Amino acid sequence: MYTKSLIVCFFAYFFSILLGYLSLAYFDLGHLWLDILLAHIVATVVIFTFSIIYKNSSLYDPFWSVIPLAIFIYLIMYPEVDESSKLRFLLIGIPVTYYAIRLTWNWSKTWPGLEKEDFRYINLYQTFGRFKLFINFFGIHLFPTLMVNICLFPLYFAITINDQPVSFVDWFFCIFTILAVLLEHVSDEQMHSFKADEKNASLTMNKGLWKYSRHPNYLGEILFWFGLFGFSLSQSFDNFWLIIFPLSMFAMFIFASIPMMDNRSLERRPDYQEYMKKTPALIPSLFK
């Protein structure tokens, strides 16, 4: 069953990226990023169609990590300036590739296959009842797509229209973004090791990075998007307004993802309430 699930997932993503690319080839909305947005939505509709056919919206989960690399590759293929820097492409590409491979691999290690759907989606279906199809498309598929798309928009300024020489800004945010992904990577590996021990089934992970933050993996994720924004400053510091996009990602985690995960842990782990009292949700306390 798991092998079949992987095959279905592979074909879903193959056709989503193919049709997304074809939309880029045949439609011109007057601005490169509008074309990319359309392709992103087309690819999302393909994944949504597969999720309806196989009755499992968890097919969408790796889309979050796969698409940023695909969009990055497209951007470096079609810069709009003559003096674009190959070194800058490398400095941006290293953390983006690390992020895509690491997060997709992490998903593959925890995905049980098509027989199980993410608890968050099931909760949404139960909450909104007869609006399930609406919530499925707009809430589970389209909303995350739009979030990722706007948070990738700073790369348009960092790559496509950037004719400035490589500077300290590029090097700083390359290192910053790699460290953000590393934080997420180490956090997830620590959690995998903890869950691998059956004795910890109903216990709360409060060791390693999880001693200082209830969601260090989310912190790494958020910092990754701030890192991508930072690359846009190498084109011009006037691009600072683009910080609204990673801030929107930050808000989504603060007001949606973290409360949802905390509530689930409170239901499943007797010691989680005490853990919440002692441990910050996201940013470690400097005075602990």
Image: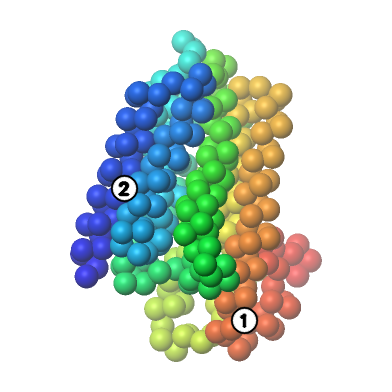
Residue 259 place in picture, x, y as percent: 65, 68
Considering the numbered disc 1 on the image, is that residue within a helix, a strand or a loop?
helix
Who is closer to the viewer here, 199 or 67? 67
* Image position of 234 with respect to 93: above or below: above
Residue 285 place in picture, x, y as percent: 74, 64
Question: Residue 31's mark?
Answer: none
Q: How many numbered badges does the structure rendering display?
A: 2
Considering the numbered disc 2 on the image, is that residue within a helix, a strand or a loop?
helix
Residue at image position (67%, 27%) is 239
Extreme residue in the top direction:
82
Q: In which quarter of the image is residue 59?
A: bottom left
- Where is mark 2, residue-wise? 13
* Image position of 94 with respect to 61: above or below: above
Q: Would you call the spot at circle 2 few (<14 residues within 10 Å), some (14-19), or many (20 or more)?
A: many
Residue 218 place in picture, x, y as percent: 58, 59
* Image position of 205 with respect to 150: above or below: below
Residue at image position (60%, 62%) is 257
Q: Quadrant of residue 189?
A: bottom left
Amino acid marked by disc 2: Tyr
Residue at image position (63%, 62%) is 256
Image quarter in which the N terminus is found:
bottom left
- Where is mark 1, residue-wise? 266
Can the viewer see residue 107?
A: no
Can the viewer see residue 7?
A: yes
Residue 255 place in picture, x, y as percent: 68, 60
Residue at image position (25%, 57%) is 8
Amino acid marked by disc 1: Leu
Would you say 263 lies left or right of 189 here? right
Alpha carbon of mark 1 to alpha carbon of mark 2: how far? 35 Å
* Image position of 44 with respect to 122: above or below: above
